[in-house]
Image (tube, grey):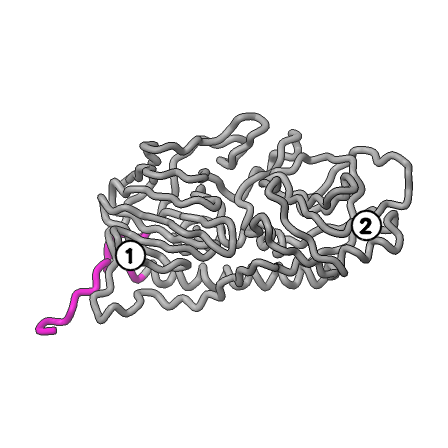
Amino acid sequence: MTGSLIILQPGHSVVTDLGRTKGPAYGLPVNGALDQYSAKAANILAGNEDNAPLLELTALDFRMRAATDLLIAVTGAPLDLTVGGRECPQWEPVSVRAGEVVAVRGIRTGLRAYIAVHGSFTVPSLLGSCAPDTVVGFGLKLVEGFRLETRKTTAPITQPYLGLPLFRLGLTKPVFTTNPVIDVTGGPDVAEFGDTADLLFTSHYTVSPRSNHIGLRLGGALPERQLTSEVLSRGVPVGAIEVPSREELLVLHRGRGVTAGYPVLAVVTSRSLDLLAQARPGHTITFRKTTVAEATAMHRTACLELDRLRNTINTVFGLLGIGAGQRWHELSPASGA
């Protein structure tokens, strides 16, 4: 049975997924959720595929009303989550009854939060992805009163005993901070900066308000390119740290164009890209040098953590009958209790 929800206060929210992996072959950015770990975790907690469409909220408060019974999960930066006026936890599955309002307020420390709904949404796609693309004008515009259709409804799951938590999933939540340490590997042009390249690791950088999903602009001590030859445009990866001027560093994120003509000093690791997605203007960034082998090991550790969560959710949801027919949705108090 399909369901729906109605946007009451959109804030700055979009429907997205993990990105348009086919896009770069056609000159389009990959885009997608900027904090990939939090987005994957939200979908796993909601019993979805990792790449299912979900909501990405940036900085501002958000409210929606469930038109049908739903199961949601909210991850990302710390925030205040209420469902029907009652406080609810992040990083856990949460039942929402038809008519209840889900409110996200006070996103803090980090910048972005993610809401996944069991069954996900029925939304348009471009090259296999629903991720918005401002260059070609693709993507849903969420406004007050907009109705999002969900592919499933989920009867409420409740725990009537002494307010005990319903789920104990053992997930290690990310640590959010105002001064994150960002791991990077050497870039293809690092030698062109000579001894000044070390400034990247001995200086602190401040996130500019001009930062966005295309790239983060960082103020601080800048390494200087020692060559005067022109840099030809070429393909650049997500996470490339460029020095486009004498004013700031530019860290390319998921909305970046697939080619650029600035020297690439270093490349941010995939796990640290998630941390940068949560950096607010004014936050202080410190860069730390790492190797490709160490970056790969950190990525594998994150993947294993999500795999364990997925296995746990599959077991729990199987017992509850979610996604496999109605078997056990409400824990009834024992007779005489």
Q: Is residue 113 magenta?
A: no
In magenta, the rendered stretch is 319-337
Q: Is residue 254 visible?
A: no
The quarter of the picture where residue 294 lies is bottom right
Mark 1 Cα-neighbour bin, 10 Å: few <14, some 14–19, many ≥20 = some
The residues bearing labels 2 and 1 have C-alpha atoms spaced at a distance of: 57 Å
For residue 230, above or below residue 268: above
For residue 156, above or below residue 58: below
Residue 184, x across and y down, in percent:
71, 56
Instruction: Look at mark 2 in the image and give the residue it sits on.
Output: 223
For residue 125, above or below residue 181: above
Q: Which mark is residue 239?
A: none
Residue 320, x across and y down, in percent:
29, 60
- Which of pointers 2 and 1 lies earlier in the amino acid sequence? 2
Please give the name of the residue rendered at 88% of the width and 47% of the height, measured from the top-left corner.
Answer: 192
Secondary structure at numbered mark 1: loop
Outermost residue, bottom direction? 336
Outermost residue, left direction? 336
Residue 278, x across and y down, in percent:
55, 52
Query: Which one is in front, 315 or 297?
Result: 297
Residue 288, x across and y down, in percent:
71, 61
Please give the name of the residue rendered at 55% of the width and 46% of the height, measured from the top-left corner.
Answer: 34
Instruction: Look at mark 1 in the image and give the residue it sits on.
Output: 321
Query: Which one is in front, 204 or 99?
Result: 204
Where's the C terminus, which quadrant?
Answer: bottom left
257 relative position to 176: left or right: right
The reply to whether discs 2 and 1 touch (Cβ–Cβ < 8 Å) is: no
Where's the N terminus, which quadrant?
Answer: top left
